[in-house]
Image: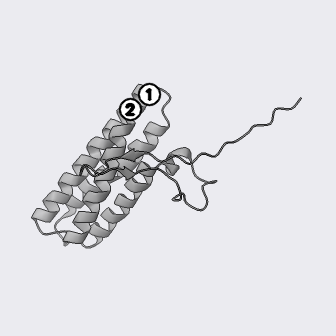
Amino acid sequence: MRFRPWRVDVDVDIVVDLDGDGNVEVAGNRGRRPADTAHMLSFQRLDVYQRAIEFLSLVYEVLADLPRGNADRADQLTRSAESVVRSIAEGAGRWSEADMANRYKIARGEAMECAASLDVMRLRKLINDARYARGIQLLEGVVAMLTKMM
């Protein structure tokens, strides 16, 4: 008798207050999966990872418009935004729940650092209001999801 693996597809919606306004939002994947997930690793399918990648893309846009003389700010924001993405991936690859939670805590801390960097850039008028608001919105979602995952 030959073993045949079986597969069950389940769409799950997680209802959480992502932005802290008291209203719950749906944080699941239903209807929002990329068209081709067959060539993705498990962590790449996570909403939190995809949102972190979206934030990193926004960071690259912001940095492209930074005036000269802001290399230190650009470097710090880039390193912290990339660290969020890498820590989520690393956490998803850990075997123990404690080790996984530790990586997600690191990612959460780096996301908070990104928000502080955006605040500094806004204070120095290095980022426009629309990009600032979008960045904070993305980071609020990342932080909320990581908090639930810890």
Return the residue found at the far left: 123
Q: For the N terminus, which image quadrant?
A: top right
The image quadrant that residue 64 belongs to is bottom left
Residue occupied by mark 1: 97
Label 2 SS? helix
C-alpha gap between disc 2 and disc 1: 6 Å
Q: Residue at x 60, y 55 (%)?
A: 37
* Image location of residue 5, percent across then percent down: 75, 37
Label 1 SS? helix
Q: Residue at x 39, y 49 (%)?
A: 85
* Image location of residue 117, percent across then percent down: 19, 55
- How many residues crowd mark 2 within 10 Å: few (<14), some (14–19), many (20+)? many
Q: Relative to the observer, which residue lies in front, 38 or 84?
A: 38
What's under tag 2, amino acid-wise?
A: Ala
Return the residue found at the far right: 1
The label number, if any, that marks residue 101 in the structure image: 2
* Image location of residue 104, percent across then percent down: 36, 38
Q: Relative to the observer, which residue lies in front, 23 or 101?
A: 23
Q: Residue at x 73, y 39 (%)?
A: 6
- Check contact, mark 2 vs mark 1: CB within 8 A: yes
Q: Is 123 left or right of 7, judged from the image as shown?
A: left
Q: Is 137 left or right of 123, judged from the image as shown?
A: right
Q: Is 92 left or right of 40, judged from the image as shown?
A: left
Q: Residue at x 16, y 63 (%)?
A: 121
* Image location of residue 86, percent across then percent down: 41, 46
Q: Is residue 107 visible?
A: yes
What's under tag 1, amino acid-wise?
A: Glu
